[in-house]
Image (cartoon, grey):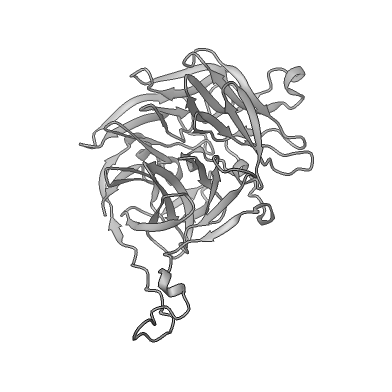
């Protein structure tokens, strides 16, 4: 079962706001620029930015298991991953307690669907690719909270589900060297060791391919309920594993600590904001070069550079003036993409790109001819609405692939 974490207050976001847009040419910023010999001596206005092209997506394939559901949120494709010639998509909702969830992929060449396995859980979220293999956590297993659960992956060449250790939730999977890490929450197995909290935000580690597991790291809130103490995401950069637990201290203030695993031991980095701990969808956090890039509040991006020297810092990059919500990131070589779903009066989703995670520019507006997204709650009332259709993105060889709220896959080129 899902919960909606509290959004950190604006006062907690002591971050650098970088409003994006095309930079003015150097001459426009100089007094008398453009004057020169025979010039007017007056500052010339910067040229207007080129209009953002609107590209129509073409139906490429359908995740038949997701598309068969009635509710738009439940059949929305949360994340996409490309490995070899296959495009993988995740879906489900542990808010609405659906499932089991079929894991499917589609051929980039033909669009043909392959069903790999069915996970006895309610949702699959982040799809992580390590060494050419795909991994995804069983977000809400349909077993008892002290029963074994785990993740699905194809590291051995064939898809399999590994359930060898108890979890309430498994939100993310990471691989660093020969070790596998699972992030989520567990029932406290030993109060004498882990304190009196009934539930723990926990990371478990396996050194034998997922056969046996040990508890590698735990955290718990100092006050209030521990029901939602969780590690929601993991990022691997330079062989190190980064994570941030959604817990609060004795004053009820959200955690600002980044936990870092390297060569068998853990260390901590205290960040100036609590944004990292407030991210609760694993697919909206990615490793990009030396940086951790994730979804922040409003229409901004959380950026933390693990290679920065001196005092830790974070930045927030605002994606222009488009109204919408960042729904997905995708890293393609030296470029990172952010998909912003339309809302309000806009009808097209917008794709942005960046070379550093901080300076972003719009690539295209995406026109996908499917109905607007809406989420119908159990009693039939519409609780939220967004006009955008695209929910996830992947890129390969200049072709853009978009998952939609209808369980369908579209592709587009510029």
Quadrant where the N terminus is found in the figure: top right
**Is 140 on the left-hand or right-hand side of 10?**
left
In the image, 293 versus 403, the foreground residue is 293
**What residue sits 28% from the left and 52% below the top?**
57
Residue 138 visible (yes or no): no
Would residue 11 be visible to someone looking at this image? yes
Q: Give residue 394's position: percent from left, percent from top.
A: 35, 43
Which of the pair 264/53 is nearer the observer? 264
Q: Position of residue 271 (x, y in %)?
A: 65, 43
Q: Nearer the viewer, residue 303 or 95?
A: 303
How far across and down, in percent of the image, does residue 125 sit? 46, 35
Is residue 283 left or right of 157 when viewed as pictured?
A: right
For the point 42% across and 46% down, the residue is 72
* Picture layout, residue 275 above or below residue 194: below
Residue 303, horizontal then vertical, whole percent = 54, 47
Q: Residue furthest left?
A: 110
Residue pictured at 69% horizontal, 56% vertical: 11
The quarter of the rendered structure image containing the C terminus is bottom left
Tell me the quarter of the picture where residue 65 sits.
top left
Examine the image and state in which quarter residue 84 appears.
Answer: top left
Considering only vertical position in the picture, is 19 above or below 246?
Answer: below
* Left or right of 177 on screen, residue 191: right
Q: Residue at the spot x=39%, y=82% of the render?
A: 35
**Residue closest to the eye, 303 or 93:** 303
- Marks counted in the figure total 0
Q: Quadrant of residue 86?
A: top left
Where is 363 relative to 227, above or below?
below
């Amino acid at each position: 079962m899902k919960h909606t974490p509290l959004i950190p207050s604006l006062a907690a976001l002591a971050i650098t706001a970088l409003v994006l847009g095309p930079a003015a040419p150097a001459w426009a910023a100089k007094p008398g620029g453009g004057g020169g010999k025979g010039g007017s001596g007056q500052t010339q206005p910067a040229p207007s930015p080129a209009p953002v092209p609107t590209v129509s997506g073409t139906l490429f394939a359908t995740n038949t298991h997701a598309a068969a559901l009635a509710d738009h949120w439940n059949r929305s494709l949360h994340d996409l991953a490309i490995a070899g010639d296959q495009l993988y998509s995740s879906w489900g909702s542990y808010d609405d307690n659906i499932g089991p969830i079929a894991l499917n992929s589609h051929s980039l060449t033909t669009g043909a669907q392959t069903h790999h396995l069915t996970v006895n859980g309610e949702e699959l979220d982040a799809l992580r690719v390590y060494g050419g293999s795909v991994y995804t956590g069983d977000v809400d297993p349909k077993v008892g909270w002290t029963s074994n659960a785990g993740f699905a992956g194809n590291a051995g060449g064939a898809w399999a589900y590994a359930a060898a250790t108890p979890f309430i939730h498994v939100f993310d999977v990471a691989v660093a060297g020969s070790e596998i890490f699972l992030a989520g929450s567990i029932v406290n197995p030993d109060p004498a060791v882990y304190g009196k909290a009934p539930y723990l935000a926990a990371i478990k580690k396996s050194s034998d391919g997922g056969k046996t597991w040990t508890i590698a790291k735990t955290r718990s809130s100092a006050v209030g309920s521990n029901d939602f103490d969780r590690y929601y995401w993991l990022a691997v950069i330079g062989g190190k594993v980064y994570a941030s637990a959604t817990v609060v201290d004795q004053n009820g203030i959200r955690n600002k600590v980044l936990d870092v695993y390297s060569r068998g031991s853990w260390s901590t980095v205290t960040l100036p904001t609590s944004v990292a701990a407030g991210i609760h969808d694993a697919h909206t956090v990615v490793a990009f070069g030396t940086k951790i890039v994730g979804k922040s509040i409003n229409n901004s991006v959380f950026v933390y550079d693990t290679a920065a020297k001196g005092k830790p810092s974070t930045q927030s990059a605002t994606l222009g003036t488009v109204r919408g919500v960042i729904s997905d990131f995708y890293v393609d070589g030296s470029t990172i993409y952010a998909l912003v779903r339309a809302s309000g009066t806009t009808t097209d989703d917008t794709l942005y790109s960046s070379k550093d995670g901080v300076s972003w520019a719009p690539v295209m507006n995406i026109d996908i001819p499917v109905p607007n997204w809406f989420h119908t709650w159990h009693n039939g009332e519409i609780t939220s609405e967004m006009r955008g259709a695209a929910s996830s993105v992947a890129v390969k060889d200049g072709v853009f692939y978009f998952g939609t709220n209808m369980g369908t896959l579209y592709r587009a080129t510029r």
